[in-house]
Amino acid sequence: MDFGLLAVHAHPDDEAIWTGGTLARYADEGARTAVVTCTWAQGTTRAAELEGSLSILGAGRPRLLGYADARKAESAPGAPRFVDVPLDEAVGRLVEHIRQFRPDVVLTYDGFGSYGHPDHVHAHRVTLAAVEAAGYDQLYPGTGEPWRPRAVYLSTIPRSVVTSHWKAVFGSPPAPDQTLPGVPDEQVTTHLDVGRWAERKWAAMLAHESEVERGASMTLLTALPEQARAQMLANEWYRRVAYTGAPTTTLDTR
């Protein structure tokens, strides 16, 4: 398969949580797959865990921008926070990865950053700007030949799925004024059944041992009843953003 899939994520473990099934599935089908991670530096525990996760998913070696997590200075000692870096700098760094890898499709978060984390929201903005900029030879000279991916897929969750699982996790339905992750169901353009790869996705998540011990990334999933957790692991949802003039490319929905 002559097809490249590049995921852009804010933190180590996001690649497994949000796009792990997609990455594993496409790697098994012969696609080139890779992940750019915007925060945490080489030499940190979480960067090492990321390497293990990517190995499980078949997504190559870590590609780290090396900026600091907005909430954890120890993620990249001496480096600026990702959210504080000038937009032009962050976009240029990502453009270089896009031009080097030359993906057909780029994956990242939806506009709410999937659940509102500032690093996720910023990764969404930087990714959309970089995908557009990578196609112009006038921009970011010296970072490789221009390349324009055919589409961006924004990882999200249908609002109906969020609300159906909310009570199972928190013990009561969401309040009327509760800010929920995800998007209205009709805005979801693509649903991928990744049930065959769910065990690998879960293994990749568990490779982030420091997060498992902290109870952070896995809290909501582990709090769900087994059937609901299996549903979340076996399904991934996206909003597709196509680019004018680019040949049509869609993620397989078999």
Image (tube, grey):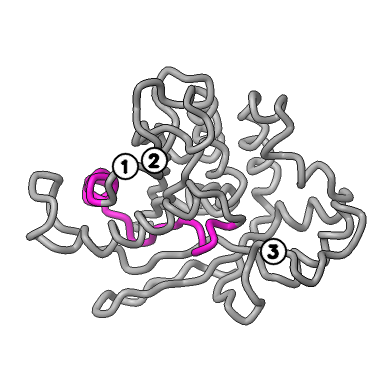
Q: Decide which of tag 2 and tag 3 comes sooner along the chain.
A: 2
Element under disc 3:
loop
Residue at image position (40%, 54%) is 5
Q: Is there a contact, CB below 8 Å, between mark 2 and mark 1?
A: yes
Label 1 and label 3: CA atoms lie apart by: 28 Å
Residue 26: x and y in percent read: 49, 53
Callout 3: 10 Å neighbours few (<14), some, many (20+)? some
Label 2 and label 3: CA atoms lie apart by: 24 Å
Q: Is there a contact, CB below 8 Å, between mark 2 and mark 3?
A: no
Residue 108: x and y in percent read: 46, 56
Q: Is residue 98 visible?
A: no
Callout 1: 10 Å neighbours few (<14), some, many (20+)? some
Q: Which residues are magenta?
A: 88-114
Indicate whether residue 233 is drawn in magenta: no
Furthest-bottom residue in this view: 186
Residue 33 lies, with reference to residue 105, above or below; the image says above
Residue type indicated by callout 3: Leu
* Residue at the spot of label 1: 85
Label 2 and label 1: CA atoms lie apart by: 5 Å
* Residue at the spot of label 2: 82
Quarter location, residue 79: top left
* Residue at the spot of label 3: 180
